[in-house]
Image (cartoon, coloured by chain):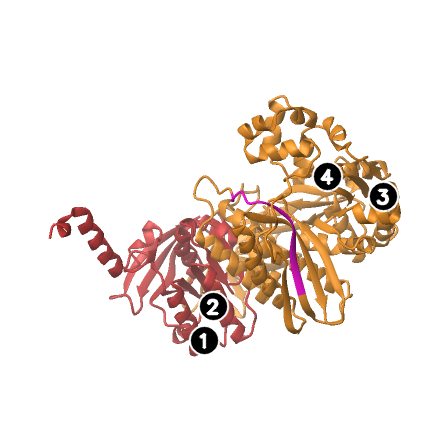
């Protein structure tokens, strides 16, 4: 038997983000066949119906809408992806107690025990197919959700087998020691699709004439290491069907499992997570002192009533203390949401079961992360634990015409702060029809009603040809009367006219006003007229 | 003694003396430098921005520190225009927006937790904060060496009685450029800033121009 790779089974639902969004919409009574999930203006997942219309992963929003106008576009929500996938994970965990969820939509389990129990890999594949089918049918309320089951030596081969099984509709089992032959004919782009190898590296391989994984496996590893560094070695191992990192053969450091026992049952998730963070910090420091970092961690939670939750979490680049605490939180939340918990947590255990040699972290060429970034990261963790994920937010550029739409605020706890600090968040391009710069510094989440009147006291209206009925002279805002000094507009804004449910038609104006009693203070406002009413949407504060 | 005359040693000694005397500051953009007595945002101190251009001025003040690598925590400031912040030069990858809980005690502990992680804090003070709460926050700011920028929109006098700002910057927009009666659009604004406060020897007026 090949000792350098573990035989694993993978259950994969392709485009899970889109399927999860679709299921969530259906639970709210909105049925959409075509759904796509967007992240940073690009499609990251789409349902089969959308794919049939030609919507591809990586398309920009407008291209995708052009291809399939009746498609529902959902925002990316890792939280939703995890929670919707939970029933599937729970169903599989009944067959194999220790399953690993590295990302929503994919379950990985070691076949050794379960396979012997059910009588071979083929039987296991059938069994997993049946379990997943039942769980997904319930989730999809009758509608079929595509999924695949693959069994092979090594994670990469099993993932690819599962993906091809999903398109065929039959489980796929790669026989023992045949992973390398199976991989040899595949294009190198699978490294980027399934093993998170950088796309630029893959593109370089293609330009070097290494089109297939077989070509990589034939080269001496030393040449690849010389050209690509540690990534070269990883790619060579992956191409040969081995696990990405060689298992550590030195004796693992003693006391590697960290167990924490609470004085009494703890019902607050935040307390468990914060304690786990402290314990994880000690564990990571202990492993680092022995030159190792943890790529797979087994998290076990026990309650006062004897319930138990076990999960394995995997991250190829190594789990930091923050990442481990985050996994504890995900596991706790999913467990609580499943209503399988009747009491507080009394004990948790973090056992690092996959270790790799610590290579140190690659920092950016210019500077890299600083002490300030580390402090900020900790403060974000702490604030998130105190206030909840929805109260600690970071801005992400989305683009739009409405000043409130250009940036969306996303929860800071689901953002890799360290990588973010090295990147640059700014508006990419200004949309046609957006407000001219400078932008208003106060943008109201809930627009304020305002009266815009002409000199004779009648409300100013806008005709179908975007002409004002009279010159605005007085505005009434929050029971105060202001006189209009100058104004600009009206500028028509028509959005999504092709979609009756989400179309918007309005006019926008800038108005400079002053209080009648104190003529020295002036304010500039952005007002819109929509559905026959004037609203203040922003202010130059 | 011979060693005392070594120029390198002499320089090291004098510079350490100066470092001890000069206050640790965060950089501000060149057009604001004259408004700060120390030439920058002093760590541990409080700046209050008031008047009708308070938010724009506050964003301008914090833009340079964020570009230089400091993190900005925006605690309890509602309706801030992120696009405007980006235009004022704020490095958005180092900005975190925090919505504190409504209760008074939790507001204080939220600000304290934010002070642990972010160099610069921007706060809008909610109603019901007492002098004792404000003092606790300011003590924390001083011990953690953060820079605190308060936004006081309208109830400036009420805020002043709660917090003890070191520098008060009151703004009045004197002119809007580019917009007329029915044509053009807002292109820039002229703002008159009155700088006063207990750390400012003499109240002075400056004029600033805000462009996107």
Horizontally, residue B163 falls left or right of residue A474, namely left
Residue with the most extreme left position? B1
In the rendered view, tell whether residue A259 sits above or below residue A81. below
Q: Which residue is mark 1?
A: B133
**Boundaries of the magenta span:** A348-361
Q: Which mark is residue A181?
A: none
Chain coloured red in this rendering: B
Name which residue lies at 19% across and 50% down: B9
Whether tag 4 and tag 2 are in contact, CB under 8 A, the answer is no
Q: Which residue is mark 2?
A: B112
For the residues tagged 4 and 2, is the chain the same?
A: no
Residue A221 in sight here: yes
Horizontally, residue A242 falls left or right of residue A167, namely left
In the rendered view, tell whether residue B111 sits above or below residue A294. below
Q: Residues within 10 Å of mark 4 (few under 14, many from 20)?
A: many
Q: Colour of chain A?
A: orange
- Check the residue under mark 3 and report the chain it is in: A
Q: Which residue is mark 3?
A: A125
Lower sequence index among marks 2 and 1: 2
Q: CA distance from mark 3 to mark 4?
A: 16 Å
């Amino acid at each position: 038997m090949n000792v350098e790779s573990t035989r694993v089974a993978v259950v994969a639902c392709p485009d899970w983000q889109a399927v999860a969004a679709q299921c969530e919409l259906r639970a709210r009574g909105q049925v959409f066949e075509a759904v796509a999930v967007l992240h940073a203006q690009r499609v990251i997942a789409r349902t089969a119906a959308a794919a049939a219309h030609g919507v591809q992963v990586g398309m920009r929003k407008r291209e995708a809408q052009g291809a399939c106008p009746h498609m529902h576009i959902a925002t990316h929500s890792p939280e939703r992806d995890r929670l919707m996938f939970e029933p599937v994970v729970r169903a599989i965990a009944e067959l194999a107690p220790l399953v690993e969820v590295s990302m929503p939509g994919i379950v990985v389990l070691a076949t050794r025990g379960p396979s012997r129990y059910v009588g071979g890999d083929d039987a296991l594949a059938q069994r997993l197919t049946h379990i997943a089918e039942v769980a997904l049918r319930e989730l999809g309320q009758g509608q079929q959700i595509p999924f695949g089951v693959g069994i092979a030596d090594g994670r990469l081969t099993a993932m690819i087998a599962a993906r091809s099984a999903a398109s065929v509709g039959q489980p796929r089992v790669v026989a023992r020691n045949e992973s390398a032959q199976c991989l040899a004919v595949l294009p190198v782009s699978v490294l980027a699709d399934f093993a998170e190898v950088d796309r630029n590296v893959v593109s370089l391989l293609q330009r070097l004439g290494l089109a297939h994984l077989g070509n990589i496996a034939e080269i001496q590893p030393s040449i690849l290491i010389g050209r690509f560094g540690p990534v070269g070695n990883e790619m060579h191992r992956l191409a040969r069907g081995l696990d990405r990192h060689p298992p550590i053969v030195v004796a693992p450091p003693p006391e590697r499992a960290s167990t924490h026992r609470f004085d009494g049952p703890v019902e607050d998730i935040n307390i468990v997570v914060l304690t786990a963070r402290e314990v994880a910090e000690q564990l990571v420091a202990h492993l680092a002192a022995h030159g190792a970092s943890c790529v797979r961690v087994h998290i076990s939670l026990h309650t006062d009533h004897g319930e138990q939750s076990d999960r394995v979490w995997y991250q190829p680049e190594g789990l930091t203390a923050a990442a481990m605490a985050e996994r504890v939180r995900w596991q706790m939340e999913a467990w609580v949401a499943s209503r399988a918990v009747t009491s507080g947590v009394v004990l948790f255990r973090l056992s690092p079961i996959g270790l790799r040699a610590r290579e140190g972290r690659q920092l950016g060429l210019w500077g890299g992360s600083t002490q300030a970034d580390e402090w900020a990261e900790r403060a974000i963790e702490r604030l998130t634990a105190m206030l909840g994920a929805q109260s600690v937010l970071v801005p992400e550029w989305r683009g739009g015409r409405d000043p409130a739409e250009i940036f969306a605020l996303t929860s800071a706890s689901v953002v890799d702060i360290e990588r973010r600090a090295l990147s640059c968040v700014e508006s990419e391009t200004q949309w046609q029809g957006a407000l001219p710069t400078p932008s208003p510094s106060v943008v109201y989440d809930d627009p304020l009603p305002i009266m815009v009147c002409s000199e004779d006291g009648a409300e100013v209206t806008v005709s179908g040809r975007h002409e004002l009925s009279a010159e605005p002279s007085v505005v009434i805002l929050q029971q105060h009367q202001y006189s209009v000094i100058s104004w600009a507009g009206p500028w028509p804004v028509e959005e999504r006219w092709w979609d009756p449910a989400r179309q918007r038609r309005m006019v926008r104006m800038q108005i400079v006003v002053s209080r009648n009693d104190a003529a020295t203070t002036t304010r500039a406002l952005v007002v819109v007229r929509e559905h026959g009413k004037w609203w203040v949407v922003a202010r130059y504060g | 003694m011979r060693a005392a005359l070594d120029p390198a040693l002499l320089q090291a000694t004098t510079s350490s003396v100066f470092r001890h005397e000069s206050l640790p500051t965060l950089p501000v953009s060149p057009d604001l430098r004259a408004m700060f007595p120390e030439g920058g945002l002093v760590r541990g101190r409080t700046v209050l921005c008031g008047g009708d251009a308070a938010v724009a001025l506050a964003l301008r003040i914090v833009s340079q520190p964020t570009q230089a690598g400091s993190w900005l925590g925006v605690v309890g400031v509602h309706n801030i225009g992120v696009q405007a912040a980006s235009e004022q030069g704020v490095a958005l990858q180092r900005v975190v927006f925090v919505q504190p809980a409504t209760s008074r005690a939790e507001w204080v502990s939220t600000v304290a937790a934010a002070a642990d992680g972010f160099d610069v804090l921007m706060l809008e003070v909610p109603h019901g904060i007492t002098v004792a709460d404000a003092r606790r926050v300011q003590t924390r700011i001083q011990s953690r060496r953060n820079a605190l920028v308060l936004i006081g929109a309208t109830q400036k006098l009420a805020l002043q009685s709660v917090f003890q700002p070191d520098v008060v910057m009151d703004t009045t927009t004197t002119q809007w450029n580019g917009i007329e009666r029915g044509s053009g659009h807002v292109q820039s604004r002229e703002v008159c800033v009155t700088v006063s406060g207990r750390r400012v020897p003499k109240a002075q007026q400056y004029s600033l121009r805000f462009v996107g």
